[in-house]
Image (spheres, helix red, strand yellow):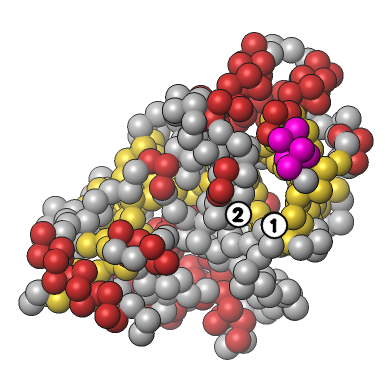
Amino acid sequence: MRFAGLLAAAFALTLAACSGETPKEDSTERAPAEQPPPQAETAVPEAPALLLTPVGFDALPDWTTDRPSEALPALLKSCGRLTVQPSERAVGPDGLAGTVADWRAPCAALSAAEGQDDAALRRLLEEQFRAFAVSNAGAAEGLFTGYYEAELTGTRDPSAPGATPLYRLPPDLVTVDLGRFRADLRGERLIGQVRDGRLVPYLTREEIDAGALEGQGAELLWAADPVDVFFLHVQGSGRVVYPDGSVTRVGFAGSNGHPFYAIGRALIAEGLVSREQASMQSIRDWLRANPDKAREVMQRNARYIFFREIKGEGPIGAQGVPLTAGRSLAVDSKVLPLGVPLYLDTTWPATDRPLRRLMVAQDVGSAIKGVVRGDFFWGSGDAALAEAGRMKQSGRYYLLLPKAVAERRQQAS
């Protein structure tokens, strides 16, 4: 294991005093959406090479028919998060999108444009930004999937049949940021718990389901259906609706650190769900129709998610702002900045009908890796699930950068 020497020193120095902590609002994470395996999937190169090619707005398909007014609320939320930071702070990896100072003028213009029609907003965007085609060393096509905010039925009775807890982040969960000990491990983390002075992997889904966290007061609330809870773990955020109509919104607080296991692939491999019909809906239906087998199948995914209550608007994306249905996109933040506008060119789920619109990069996902890779946020409830569960489309996108940043890029080249 390449971390062995480092960990011995790191643990001796720090683990005796470590405890788990809730991630900051701008460092949330989603588990990868459960997707059926593709017939053929192009592997993402280990070292993706981001290439930005300047283009005119007339190169963006259907740019003149999109409704940027629908994206404006998402843009303003990202601007609000971005512009309160120090002016000299770099935006994106290696300052790809300039500095915060570069965003003040376009964000102010967008804020002043509230209430304007789509034509006026389009002109403003063309004045304030420049468009760049995004590719991985010239390969412009990538994969676009979908996700949604799960909706569950809550219960006030923990003893009711099927009642399943959502747990807060346990106090004994330890997160080790390896980048604090060695620069080349920046972004690498280990999650576990300390037993007899040693860091060991944290409890698995099977161990937690068996009651390993009971009696610690870690329950945040209870939901009525264990299958719904499993899919909430996959999505990472959701709304819990009680019979009296009250709603509690929950979001990702942390994970047990175990890798994600796609049970859909296993169900197909074992002939329990057909490849042609595989989707999040069909997997959920199978689990509910086979309760005796469902528990074992779900426990194959050892990854377990812990939650926190979200007050006010949500769900909250990785940028720390509420997501906007149909206009928020999850991207690989190691490649692209969060908070920037992207023009998406793909197709509607399971069709060849064009889906082209202005989006905002506001979230991440542990399966969203690569230069041209996105996860489309569809909103909440069953209608959003229907779209998200079928989405596995090829597509591309264009990055919009402030005019000042684009001019510097042009001068540098």
Q: Which residue is pictured at 25% across the width and 69% down the height?
A: 192
Name the kind of residue labelled 2 in the image: Val
Question: x, y (%) of residue 393?
Answer: 75, 60
Q: Quadrant of residue 108?
A: top right
Q: Residue furthest front?
A: 412
Q: Is 208 displayed left or right of 112 in the figure?
A: left
N-terminal of the two: label 1 or label 2? 1
Q: How far across and down, in percent of the image, does residue 23 sit?
A: 33, 48
The image's mark for residue 67 is: none
Nearer to me, 339 or 158:
339
Residue stretch rendered in magenta on the structure: 406-412
In which quadrant of the rendered view does residue 293 lie?
bottom left
Q: Can you identify the residue that label 2 sits on? A: 335
Distance in Å between CA atoms under marks 1 and 2? 7 Å
371 in relation to 90, above or below: below
Position of residue 261 relative to residue 345, above or below, is below
Q: Nearer the viewer, residue 224 or 69?
A: 69
Mark 2: few/some/many CA within 10 Å (<14, 14-19, 20+): some
Q: Secondary structure at mark 1?
A: strand
Taking 391 as reference, is 368 left or right? left
Predominant secondary structure, magenta span: helix
The answer to whether the residue labelled 1 contacts the one labelled 2, judged by CB atoms less than 8 Å apart, is yes
Give the residue drawn at x 64%, y 11%: 112
Q: Residues within 10 Å of mark 1 (few under 14, many from 20)?
A: some
Residue 14: x %, y % from top left: 15, 63
Q: Is residue 242 above or below residue 374?
A: above
126 horizontally vs 73: left or right: right
Q: Amino acid at mark 1?
A: Leu
Residue under the image location 87 percent in, 31 percent down: 65
> Which residue corresponds to mark 1?
50
Please tell me whether residue 100 belongs to the stretch shown in magenta.
Answer: no
